[in-house]
Image (spheres, grey):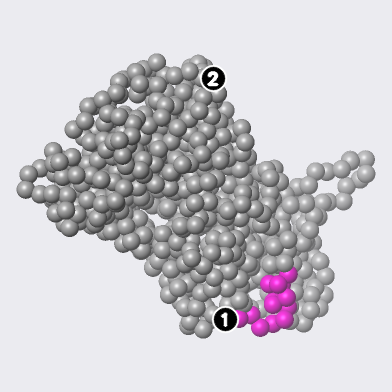
Amino acid sequence: MAKFRVRVSTGEACGAGTWDKVSVSIVGTKGESPLLPLDHLGKEFTAGAEEDFEVTLPQDVGQVLLLRVRKAPPDLPPRLGLRAPDAWFCRWFQLVPPRGTPLHFPCYQWLEGAGDLVLREGAAKVSWADHHPTLLQQRQEELQAKQEKYKWKTYIQGWPHCLDQVTVKDLDLNIKYSAVKNAKFHLKVRSAFIELKLKGLLDRKGLWRSLREMRRMFNFHRTPASDYVFKHWQEDAFFASQFLNGLNPVMIHRCRSLPKNFPVTDAMVAPVLGPGTSLQAELERGSLFLVDHGILSDIHTNIINGRPQFSAAPMTLLYQRPGRGPLLPLAIQLSQTPGPNSPIFLPSDDKWDWLLAKTWVRNAEFSVHEALTHLLHAHLLPEVFTLATLRQLPHCHPLFKLLIPHMRYTLHINTLARELLIAPGQVVDRSTGIGIEGFSELIKRNMKQLNYSNLCFPEDIQARGVEDIPGYYFRDDGMKIWEAVERFVSEMVSIYYPSNVSVQNDQELQAWVKEIFSNGFLGQESSGMPSSLDTQKALVQFVTMVIFTCSAKHTAVSLSQFDSCVWMPNLPPTMQLPPPTTKGQARPEGFIATLPPVNATCDVIIALWLLSKEPGDRRPLGTYPDEHFTEEAPKQSIASFQNHLAQISRDIEERNQILALPYTYLDPPLIENSVSI
């Protein structure tokens, strides 16, 4: 007979404790013990508690391999009736044998209802490092259970595949919002709708009466950044700067030769370029940049309040003055087909002509950002990474331990989006200019163009030729974050993968990569997305891409939404009149008539306010309160990563002190670990 001490830690979250009875059995190299109740007088397993129990094994089970945990409702007299299932969030178990080192069993899972859960000792193990048949069997059984639990489905043909659940009510607790986060989220939704209803704006289908009246909307949860947008939205320098540091800072690229369908001439741009130079000279110097929204050509447009809406596919030429002068717009063409009905708009044109052209570009930015930069790249792809991780990597796998904090709540928010944002009759359908059909078509088009290098931040910056354009804080901060994540991942990979062969021989890793390729990139080899990994270097890049996409990339393109849109003329979600085909016709009243109706404006601004503001239960990048790693080496790497991020934050804060509009969207304390909103 052997006595073991068992220490149990229950989570602190609302509802984490349980009245249910918990028993354990110890699985060793010589067999498995019977179930051993963990029982004291009074209630056990209250939220935030750490409790000690002593259990006696009737026989020697040998070297401990696994800990089997069983949760079951207590025996109650029939007269008390049925009890509702009582979930329990277990943080970890610690098992102290009669002689030897305490064994730590990380859990960090909800146990719902009655059932068993098998836990492994905390050291991370790749599959080829497990040799005992019992451990190999446990890995296989865990993956089989998770693959049965988390299944793929096709939501829309041509989109990345997603979780096969319809509503968040169907999700298990391990992927749902916490009770606190869920309550705060729905409270924000209700308060926003009530506020705008009381102002009489939410249900008003007509036009805004004036720009001055729109200020009533602007006062909705103002921020310092939105105040800046309101003051400067008509200025050319601010218009151009948003391609660098606004909500969609991923499209600008250096222009070495003008597209044939964008016939800008020297005479057109001479007022901005000044004397002594020419278009060709500036192209050769590398001072011209292009933003091309051609993907919007002939896109489906929506009907709002019974009125057809309109879209454009503009091309915008920009000029970087010598030295560190501001980036400025040179010319805008609102279609991909030049000709008499598609004039090239210039800063020297009438004020309202030029402002209207810039506003059409901003509307194109809204459509491309919301459908592609935000929904596809920063939500749908992270969902693919999350599902593949849950299905193909067991909890003991070092990559599961590394990645799971960066996948927290992603399945919840994406399921909610399919319920409340991109479903028929919801926000995208009723209040955006291209609607669900337009969003769907954009995603299908972009999926055919999407390339692995687009997702690897340094490669994307280099491919767009924007390594040295000044004032590109998204690039500067993004590179620092990427390098910090890459160094961290490299250290972690080197701990568990001593050679390229060790990467090749990890069949769970290879299955994970293949599932991402098959379900996220639909098996398209043209995407350049790897379907297997052969080297340590390739593994480091791939995992860095996953973490960066799920954290920094999402935050940069999500946190900025409300600041950009609350002054609606800066980011109109739809346009109610067609793009101008001649110059000299624009007037203030026509400008107002082109902008979205009042109810669509309010609808979209509420949605983007919710998606820009974490409702609570935050975990900034590098914050890992769930200690999945128990060994000293990964703990040291985590601490080093956190210190690196802290220094990046200090550098950003110092730089921002001298900026008229501080760039904060990639400040590490504001970057969420995962796509959670």
Q: Quadrant of residue 60?
A: bottom right
Boundaries of the magenta span: 128-141
Image quadrant in which the N terminus is located: bottom right
Q: Is residue 130 magenta?
A: yes
Q: CA distance from mark 2 to mark 1?
A: 60 Å
Q: Residues within 10 Å of mark 2 (few under 14, many from 20)?
A: some
> Is 477 placed left or right of 396 in the picture?
left
Q: Is residue 415 in view from this perspective?
A: yes
Query: In the image, what residue type sits under mark 2?
Result: Asp
Percent x, y for residue 49?
Answer: 64, 52
Q: What residue is shown at x 25% (from left), y 45% (from top)?
A: 263
The disc labelled 1 sits on which kind of residue? Asn
Residue 314 visible somewhere in the drawing? no
On the rendered structure, is 660 left or right of 552? Answer: left
Image x and y of residue 444, in percent: 53, 51
Q: Taking 69 as reference, is 9 left or right?
A: left
Q: Which residue is mark 2?
A: 203
Marks 2 & 1, CB-CB < 8 Å contact: no
The residue indicated by pointer 1 is 505
Q: Main secondary structure of the magenta part?
A: helix
